[in-house]
Image (cartoon, rainbow, N blue to C red):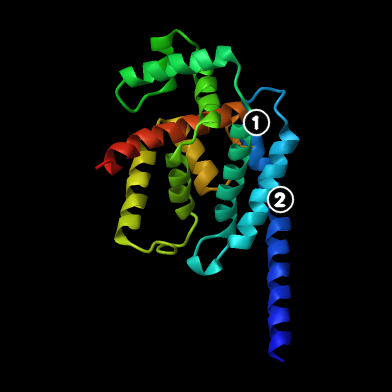
């Protein structure tokens, strides 16, 4: 009898994993579209898509519903991480882009935070679009631990009040993040709100704001960089 119950539970768990995977396959394409929006055309998207699917499968296997976090938010972090890991392993940048990244990085060190793409453009002589492209490309090839921490914090906004928040410190993090979002420029604040809090797709935000998807992607990336700079001084010892 006990063996039968165990087999039933295992089968039920497999069915639940399959349901979660099939129900969120579109998230893989959505996240890949955002990441690939500013990548060179020769990048193997199919390879990145496969990595994203593997990230989704791993998320379904690791998901614990008792922690009070919605599966979609949990899975998106794992999908994005898997795609970025694959990209960093297999996507070297051309020398011209590396030189521009170095120029932007040096300019960044000379400015007081929060550093905007417009300020970097004035200092480097590059266009705002070129600066944003450099920032996006640089994020693809180096690890930035703050990104996952920021995404985790933003994902908390999808939870009911108090769900998944196991400490006063975590609630304080939410308050700091909310305050930082309020300090963003209007367009960046709107894009972050629509993407993370309203859970709209890039194409839906683009249609709503009458912008291209690539432009929305750049605004979202700029907003995340500004949030990092606004939050970092508060979290550093």
Towards the viewer: 1 or 219: 1
Picture quarter containing residue 5? bottom right
Picture quarter containing residue 58? bottom right
> Is residue 112 left or right of 140 when viewed as pictured?
left
Residue at image point 71% right, 68% down: 14
Per the image, label 1 sits on a secondary structure element best described as helix
Towards the viewer: 6 or 232: 6
Residue at image point 28% right, 41% down: 234
Which quadrant is the N terminus positioned in?
A: bottom right
Mark 1 sits on what residue? 90
Please report whichever mark, 2 or 1, sits nearer to the chain's N-terminal start: 2
Which quadrant is the C terminus positioned in?
A: top left
**Total count of labels:** 2
**Residue 152 appears at what percent x and percent y?**
46, 50
Determine crowd level at label 2: few under 14, some 14-19, many 20+ residues with C-alpha closer than 10 A: some
Per the image, label 2 sits on a secondary structure element best described as helix
Mark 2 sits on what residue? 25
From the viewer's perspective, is the residue at label 2 or at label 1 nearer? Answer: 1
Mark 2–mark 1 distance (CA, rounded to whole Å): 23 Å
**Residue 150 appears at what percent x and percent y?**
44, 44
The vertical placement of 146 against 140, above or below, is below
The vertical placement of 99 against 203, above or below, is above
**Residue 197 appears at what percent x and percent y?**
50, 48
Picture quarter containing residue 16? bottom right
> Is residue 37 left or right of 105 when viewed as pictured?
right
Residue 203 visible in the current orientation: no
Residue at image point 55% right, 53% down: 73
């Amino acid at each position: 009898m006990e063996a039968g119950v165990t087999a039933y539970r295992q089968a039920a768990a497999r069915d639940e994993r399959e349901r979660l995977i099939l129900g969120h396959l579109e998230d893989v394409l959505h996240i890949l579209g955002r990441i690939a929006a500013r990548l060179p055309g020769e990048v193997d998207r199919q390879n990145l898509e496969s990595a994203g699917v593997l990230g989704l499968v791993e998320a379904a296997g690791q998901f614990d519903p008792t922690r009070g976090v919605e599966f979609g938010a949990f899975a998106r972090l794992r999908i994005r991480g898997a795609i970025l890991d694959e990209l960093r392993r297999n996507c070297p940048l051309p020398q011209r882009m590396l030189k521009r990244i170095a120029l932007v990085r040096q300019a960044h060190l000379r400015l007081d935070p929060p550093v905007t793409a417009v300020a970097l453009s004035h200092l480097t002589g590059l266009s705002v679009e070129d600066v944003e492209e450099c920032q996006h490309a640089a994020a693809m090839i180096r690890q930035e631990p703050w990104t996952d921490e920021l995404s985790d914090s933003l994902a908390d906004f999808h939870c009911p009040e108090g769900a998944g928040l196991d400490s006063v410190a975590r609630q304080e993090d939410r308050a700091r993040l909310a305050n930082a979002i309020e300090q963003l420029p209007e367009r960046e604040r709107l894009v972050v709100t629509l993407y993370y809090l309203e859970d709209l797709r890039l194409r839906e935000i683009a249609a709503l704001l009458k912008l291209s998807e690539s432009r929305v992607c750049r605004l979202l990336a700029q907003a995340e960089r500004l949030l990092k700079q606004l939050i970092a001084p508060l979290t550093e010892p």
